[in-house]
């Protein structure tokens, strides 16, 4: 009931409607001078870890295929180098987010390597085993069915390829419960999952050597497809 009422307000609603929260998130990420202290204040999390996670993109060799889903406003492009020679597929359910990513790609001089695709992470329109890296930054908690999303992210990985990302998980403590509940009321946070569930789902889809790094309300994860 509350979510239905809130969804009628301007700037409020699910990710497809480009909510104000999405714009605020992008602003904090693209303006680290303000974003770093805001993330520390609101989530007790180090925003610099998000930037560090994108370095995985820069380590990909010429000819590699990278999937960034949900790409949001293009934070993953921080790791992509001009002339790197990779195929970077930026996928998101929101056309507005994709437009932002395309603008960021132009600004960073990497637009020639970036393909924007409207796609649902829970039903990816890509072939099995077709990517060398899957990036999913601050996205898993947004999905209505995170278990299916994890299975899809793992499915499109080549054997030996890496999945890396971050999420607001359910077992990071009561200090962040108001964020999870508020996000669900606004329609921008889905069912969610715990760290244990995430590791179990990854293992069930042949992703091994999973490493978790908590940072306040956010948990960073990395694993390799077997």
Image (cartoon, rainbow, N blue to C red):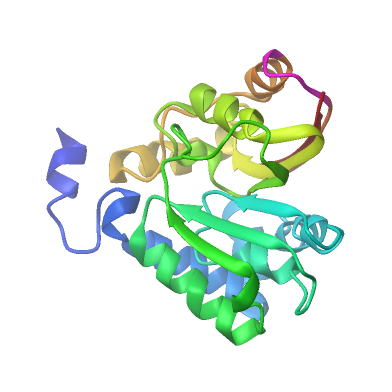
Does the magenta portion include 205?
A: yes
Residue 203 falls left or right of residue 39: right
Q: Quadrant of residue 128?
A: top right
Question: Which stretch is magenta?
Answer: 204-208
**Can I make out residue 74 in this image?**
yes
Residue shown at 50%/66% (left/top)?
Answer: 73
Give the answer, above or below, for where 7 lies relative to 110. Answer: above
Q: Position of residue 186 (x, y in %)?
A: 30, 46
Residue shown at 77%/54% (left/top)?
Answer: 64
Q: Quadrant of residue 166?
A: top right
Residue shown at 77%/69% (left/top)?
Answer: 85
Q: Position of residue 185 (x, y in %)?
A: 30, 40
Q: Quadrant of residue 173?
A: top right
Residue 122 falls left or right of residue 139: left
**Can I make out residue 44 in this image?**
no
Does the magenta portion include 226?
A: no
Give the answer, above or below, for where 99 lies relative to 69. Answer: below
């Amino acid at each position: 009931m509350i979510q239905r009422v809130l969804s009628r307000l301007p700037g409020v609603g699910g990710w497809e409607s480009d909510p104000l929260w999405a714009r605020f998130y992008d602003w904090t990420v693209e303006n680290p001078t303000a974003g770093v202290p805001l993330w520390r204040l609101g989530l007790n999390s180090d925003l610099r870890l998000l930037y560090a996670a994108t370095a995985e993109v820069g380590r990909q060799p010429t000819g590699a295929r990278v999937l960034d889903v949900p790409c949001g406003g293009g934070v993953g492009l921080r790791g992509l180098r001009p002339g790197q020679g990779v195929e970077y597929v930026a996928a998101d359910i929101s056309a507005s987010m994709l437009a932002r990513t395309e603008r960021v790609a132009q600004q960073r001089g990497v637009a020639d390597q970036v393909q924007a695709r409207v796609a649902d992470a829970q039903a990816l329109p890509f072939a099995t085993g077709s990517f060398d890296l899957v990036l999913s930054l601050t996205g898993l908690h947004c999905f209505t069915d995170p278990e299916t999303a994890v299975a899809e992210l793992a499915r499109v990985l080549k054997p030996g390829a890496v999945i890396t990302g971050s999420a607001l998980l359910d077992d990071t403590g009561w200090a962040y419960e108001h964020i999870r509940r508020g996000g669900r009321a606004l329609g921008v946070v889905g069912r969610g999952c715990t760290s244990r569930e995430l590791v179990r789902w990854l293992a069930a889809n042949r992703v091994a050597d999973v490493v978790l790094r908590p940072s306040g309300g956010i948990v960073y994860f990395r694993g390799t497809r077997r």
